[in-house]
Image: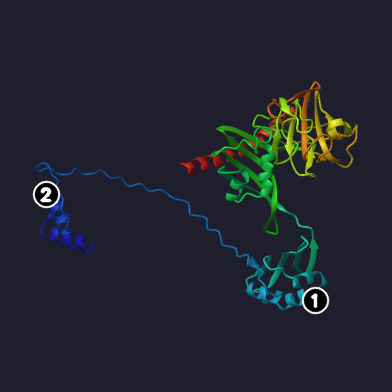
């Protein structure tokens, strides 16, 4: 700025008004030590720029006075060897009346059994006076202390969990659970993913490198701390380039199930396997060497190897047609389902409580336990899927879907699903960007 003032003042002193503008520009550039190459037409001058003065009246801004609440929450994690006094000291509590109440009140005595790792939350004013205290006890209840007009009150009540949504996405490198662990997904949610898509994806044998999933799920918080996972709200599983999506819907009767974006049920009317995470030792075949009879026979079912006592679940909704001993089947349960469908569960070690002819069972309900009864050389489940009392291969047959969203609830379902569709797309985009 000083250089500018010197040049302008010097120019005025020598009559700058008569100096061509191109010379004045060169003088200014040289004054700043700038070297530039440019050309101007001889004896040319820059045109005058027309100016116009505009004046407007602006409304004065509204200034809101900052209101101080003087109340805030603090939280301190309990360390080994801590006492109530030491924790409150770290929280800057300076309140003799509060300390006396916490020491004498019977309801507050649980505070003298603080567990390392848990947290103590307090609400104070700016002078260190205790207004409220919250502590999640070892039995899962919440101890709440509050300051009222007549002093302090302490009470213990069952927690009121709050539910928030989280999203995770991962790519399969070895197994579903390994991929889930890599992104910190709770095991309960991983199990739900496998259950939701079990009708379309064989998680035992049909996972491929590069398969991926995105899931939006509930997490429950109690007193500001995560207390466990809830249910999967929306999920996508991409297997061999094919995408499967599912969305949770709680119907008006309270029953929760999963549906596609257009309202079709994700749940098949039947499960592919009545057992969780096992292996097939003998598939459906028209000719195999029978391990017990030592003759070539058709094997019109699937054998699942599993330890004795492994739970066996109904593959679909139905009614118990037979539960007892029958020839080579040993202990066997036969279920009649809707239409012409029926299923058989053989070689059981024992039946589940209440399983008897005429009893209705739901898909996934426990009906018995793996055993080695009848013509069996080792513990396993022999499972048959029948249509019109004729055995079909349960691993390859096209399974029918369950009922779709009720017509009267479709509009509400679509409103619920719309933002979840966007969330799954976001998670998928993040995964693809990370892969690139």
Above-or-below relation of 338 to 219: above
- Judge from the rendering whether residue 423 lies leftward or rightward of residue 145; answer left or right: left
Which residue has dot 2 on it?
Answer: 20
Residue 193 occupies quadrant: top right
Task: Say whether residue 315 is visible.
Answer: no
Measuring 77% from the left and 37% from the top, which residue is drawn there?
A: 381
Residue at left offset 72%, top offset 70%: 114
Q: Earlier in the sequence, mark 2 or mark 1?
A: 2
Task: Judge the density around disc 2: few (<14), some (14-19), many (≥20) Cα neighbours within 10 Å.
Answer: few
Return the residue at label 1.
Answer: 104
For the N terminus, the quadrant is: bottom left
Q: Could you say where residue 194 lies in the image, as x and y percent from the top left?
A: 67, 40
Indicate the position of residue 53 as horizontal and vertical percent values.
Answer: 32, 47
* Vertical side of 391 occupied by 308: above or below: below
For the residues labelled 2 and 1, say whether their Cβ atoms are less than 8 Å apart. Answer: no
Left or right for 7, reference 148: left
**Cα–Cα span, label 2 and label 1:** 95 Å
Res. 211 in view: yes
Image spot of residue 158 (x, y percent): 79, 58
Location of residue 86 with respect to 45 vertically, above or below:
below
Disc 2 versus disc 1: nearer the observer: 1
Give coordinates of residue 337: x percent, y percent: 82, 28
Residue at far left of view? 42
Could you say whether the residue bearing mark 2 is in a helix, strand or loop?
loop
């Amino acid at each position: 700025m000083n250089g500018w003032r010197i040049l302008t003042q010097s120019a005025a002193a020598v009559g700058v008004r008569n100096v061509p503008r191109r010379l004045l520009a060169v003088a200014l550039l040289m004054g700043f030590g700038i070297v530039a190459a440019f050309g101007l037409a001889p004896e040319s001058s820059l045109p005058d720029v027309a100016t116009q003065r505009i004046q407007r009246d602006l409304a004065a801004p509204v200034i809101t006075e900052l209101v101080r609440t003087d109340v805030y929450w603090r939280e301190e994690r309990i360390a080994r060897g801590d006492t109530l006094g030491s924790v409150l000291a770290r929280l800057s509590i300076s309140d003799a009346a509060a300390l006396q109440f916490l020491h004498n009140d019977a309801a507050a005595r649980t505070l003298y059994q603080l567990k390392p790792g848990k947290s103590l939350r307090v609400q104070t004013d700016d002078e260190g006076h205790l207004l409220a205290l919250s502590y999640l006890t070892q039995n899962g209840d919440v101890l709440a202390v509050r300051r009222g007009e007549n002093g302090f009150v302490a009470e213990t009540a069952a927690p009121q969990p709050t539910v928030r949504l989280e999203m995770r996405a991962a790519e399969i490198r070895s197994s579903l659970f390994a991929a889930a662990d890599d992104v910190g997904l709770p095991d309960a949610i991983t199990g739900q993913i496998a259950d939701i898509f079990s009708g379309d994806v064989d998680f035992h044998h049909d996972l491929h490198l590069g398969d991926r999933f995105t899931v939006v799920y509930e997490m429950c918080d109690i007193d500001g701390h995560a207390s466990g996972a809830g249910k999967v709200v929306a999920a996508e599983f991409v297997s061999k380039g094919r995408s499967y999506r599912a969305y949770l819907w709680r119907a008006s009767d309270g029953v929760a199930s999963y549906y596609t974006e257009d309202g079709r049920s994700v749940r098949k009317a039947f499960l592919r396997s009545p057992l969780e995470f096992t292996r097939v030792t003998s598939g459906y075949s028209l000719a195999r060497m029978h391990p017990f009879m030592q003759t070539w026979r058709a094997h019109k079912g699937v054998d699942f190897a599993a330890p004795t006592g492994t739970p066996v679940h109904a593959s679909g909704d139905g009614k118990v047609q037979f539960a007892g001993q029958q020839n080579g089947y040993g202990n066997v349960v036969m279920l009649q389902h809707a239409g012409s469908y029926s299923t058989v569960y053989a070689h059981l070690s024992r039946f589940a409580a209440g399983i008897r002819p005429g009893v209705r069972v739901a898909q996934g309900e426990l009906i018995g336990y793996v055993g080695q009864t009848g013509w069996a050389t080792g513990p396993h489940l022999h499972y048959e899927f029948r249509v019109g009392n004729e055995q079909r291969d349960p691993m390859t047959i096209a399974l029918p879907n369950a009922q779709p969203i009720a017509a009267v609830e479709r509009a509400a379902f679509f409103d619920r699903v719309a933002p979840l569709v966007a969330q799954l797309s976001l998670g998928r985009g993040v995964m693809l960007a990370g892969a690139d």
